[in-house]
């Protein structure tokens, strides 16, 4: 009987952990979305007021303490190397970070393809379009976290308790 009670408690705990981890994933997606927005705003400011090229920009972004979730920035070059293409390096760096959701990845890849390909005004226009897309995405991520996060935590715990009761 004691073994069944212990098993029931373990099932309840496992269900709760599963629900909380799924809710945490939603929170991480929201945080990645917010930091991507910060990166776009910082980039726009640096391009507008300092006219930085892509290598100087990547150096500033890498040094920013506000963008710690965007670890792909550490893989970007800070100076030109012959035979290397910055846009290809950006793409491989973004794709190497596993925790970036598909929508943010699409925006980051688009940003990486557009940056440095036109004059300052053209780059700022592109960044503005990416920021608009990201604002709608952030709103959706926030709503998902608030609505689904509570659902995942509750259902995970309830399914765990239900499995525990079935064991007893």
Image (cartoon, grey):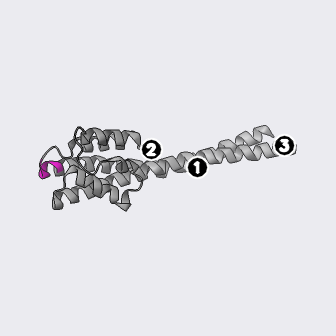
What's the CA distance linking mark 1 and mark 3?
A: 26 Å
Q: What residue would you read off at disc 1?
A: 20
Per the image, label 1 sits on a secondary structure element best described as helix
Q: What residue would you read off at disc 3?
A: 3
Reading the chain from its start, which is encountered first: label 1 or label 3? Answer: 3
Q: Quadrant of residue 155?
A: top right
Residue 142 in picture, x, y percent from top left: 42, 52
Q: Quadrant of residue 91?
A: top left
In depth, the one of 84 and 139 nearer the eye is 84
Residue 61 in picture, x, y percent from top left: 31, 56
Q: Is residue 91 above or below residue 77?
A: above
Decide if residue 103 is in sight here. Answer: no
In depth, the one of 155 and 137 nearer the eye is 137
Residue 96 in picture, x, y percent from top left: 40, 40
Q: Is residue 122 magenta?
A: yes
Pointers 1 and 3 in contact (CB under 8 A)?
no
């Amino acid at each position: 009987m004691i073994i069944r009670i212990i098993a029931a408690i373990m099932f309840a705990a496992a269900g709760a952990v599963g629900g909380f981890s799924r809710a945490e994933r939603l929170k991480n997606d929201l945080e990645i979305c917010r930091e991507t927005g910060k990166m776009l705003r910082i980039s726009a400011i640096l391009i507008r007021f300092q006219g930085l090229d892509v290598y100087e920009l990547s150096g500033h972004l890498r040094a920013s303490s506000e963008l710690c979730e965007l670890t792909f920035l550490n893989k970007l070059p800070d100076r030109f190397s012959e035979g290397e293409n910055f846009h290809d390096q950006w793409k491989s760096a973004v794709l190497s970070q596993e925790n970036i959701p598909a929508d943010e990845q699409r925006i980051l890849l688009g940003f990486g393809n557009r940056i440095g390909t036109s004059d300052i005004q053209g780059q700022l226009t592109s960044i503005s379009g990416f920021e608009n897309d990201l604002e709608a995405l952030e709103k959706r991520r926030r709503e998902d976290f608030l609505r689904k996060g509570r659902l995942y935590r509750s259902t995970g715990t309830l399914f765990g308790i239900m499995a525990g009761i079935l064991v007893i």
